[in-house]
Amino acid sequence: MTEINHKEHAHLHSHTHDPKHMQNIVNRLSRSIGHLNAVKSMVERGEDCSDVLIQLAAVKGELNSISKKILEEHLDHCIVEAIEEHDMEAIEKLHNAINQMIK
């Protein structure tokens, strides 16, 4: 797995996102973290591997859903602005992010 250098991949926004929408994403991430911690506890307790796999699939589904919401937000705001400003770097970063998402 590749370690991400956040400074290298930082995208400074010249616009703002809807705070309610971003809070919803943060809340969903918090729930997914809690769910993943519960799965970790299942493993620590030696629970049935099939049950653990089912819960991991649920966490993966949650994360995919969150990723979709972030992508939609990015397309609706950041990429629209990037196209208007002919910011090819932002568009290339989106291509790279999508490639990482679908590996």
Image (cartoon, rainbow, N blue to C red):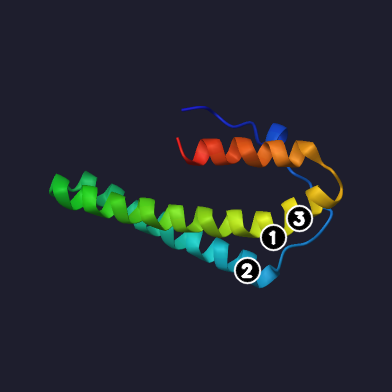
Q: Which residue is drawn at 46% across and 58% down?
A: 65
Report the Cα–Cα distance between label 2 and label 3.
17 Å
Residue 80: image tag: 3
Q: Does residue 13 appear in the picture of this structure?
A: no
The image quarter in which residue 25 lies: bottom right
Furthest residue in direction top, as rendered: 2
- Left-right relation of 77 to 20: right
Q: How crowded is mark 3: few (under 14 residues within 10 Å), some or many (20 or more)?
A: some
Please tell me whether mark 2 or mark 3 is closer to you in this view: 3
Kind of residue at badge 2: His
Secondary element at image label 1: helix
Judged from the image, the secondary structure of the residue bearing numbered disc 3 is helix
Residue extending furthest toward the left: 48
Reading the image, the residue beneath label 2 is: 21
- 12 w.r.t. 35: above or below: above
Measured as percent of width and height from the top left, residue 8 is found at 71, 32
- According to the image, label 1 marks what residue? 76
